[in-house]
Amino acid sequence: MVSDQALVHVVQTQADLYRDQFDTKNVSLEDLKKEGFLSESQYKKAIKEKIQVQE
């Protein structure tokens, strides 16, 4: 689905922003949610769709 692909793109973009802000290579969906890079609904959908953060 297009919405699933869009969420993959959002997660990856937010992970890149997280890495830049916190100067780290390691980032998880939980980190993104905790620091406000993903909303609760984005986080839940990413978990449901088994989206993984790419390095």
Image (cartoon, grey):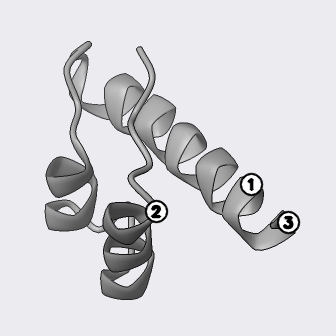
Question: Label 2 sits on what residue type?
Answer: Glu
Residue 42: quadrant of the picture: bottom left
- Residue on which the image places disc 1: 5
In the displayed orientation, state which residue is furthest to the bottom.
41
Q: Residue at x 20, y 60 (%)?
A: 35
Residue 34: quadrant of the picture: bottom left
Q: Position of residue 30 (x, y in %)?
A: 15, 55
The reply to whether callout 1 and callout 3 are in contact (CB within 8 Å) is yes
Q: Nearer the viewer, residue 5 or 14?
A: 5
- Residue on which the image places disc 2: 49
Question: Label 1 sits on what residue type?
Answer: Gln
Question: Label 3 sits on what residue type?
Answer: Val
How crowded is the residue under tag 1: few (<14 C-alpha within 10 Å), some, or many (20+)? few
Q: How many marks?
A: 3
Pair 1/2: label in front = 2
Q: Residue at x 16, y 49 (%)?
A: 31
